[in-house]
Amino acid sequence: MPGLIFTYTTQHAYVANTGGAKIRSTNILKSGKSCSIGSWLYVAYFYYGGGGSVQEAMENGGIQKISVIDRESMNIIYGLFYQECTVVWGE
């Protein structure tokens, strides 16, 4: 989500295909995050696009059962720096 100076948004995400991970009614004990970052200024030197997956967020947080999947977006100076994250909550 582009912003002129700074934009930060969070939202609940519905993911139909989570790569085998099932969303369940479980306790929220911990969270895991997976991000991709980049910049339109130095695309070849400053870009990590492999992040943002539900599976990677589960692994980063040590989560076996998912309760909630959220999304975070941050944008500075209309894309000079941007970050997209998937946040998984569960046990």
Image: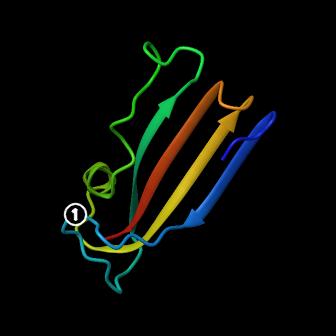
Left or right of residue 67, residue 58 in this image: left
Number of numbered discs on residues? 1
Q: How far across and down, in percent of the image, does residue 67 sit? A: 38, 76
Q: Quadrant of residue 9?
A: bottom right
Image point 69% across, 48% down: which residue? 8
Image point 44% across, 54% down: which residue? 86
Residue 34 drawn above or below residue 87 = above
Left or right of residue 76, residue 58 in this image: left
Q: How far across and down, in percent of the image, does residue 49 sit? A: 39, 34
Q: Residues within 10 Å of mark 1 (few under 14, many from 20)?
A: few
- Residue at far right of view: 4
Image point 56% across, 53% down: which residue? 72
Q: How far across and down, in percent of the image, does residue 35 sit? A: 43, 42
Under mark 1, the amino acid is: Gly
- Residue at far left of view: 20
Left or right of residue 77, residue 22 in this image: left
Q: How far across and down, in percent of the image, does residue 91 sit? A: 31, 71
Residue 54 drawn above or below residue 52 = below
Nearest the eye: 50 or 56: 50
Nearest the eye: 34 or 90: 34
Element type where label 1 sits in the image: loop
**Residue of label 1:** 19
Residue 85 drawn above or below residue 41 = below
Looking at the picture, the colour scheme in use is rainbow
Image point 60% across, 16% down: which residue? 41
Nearest the eye: 64 or 52: 52
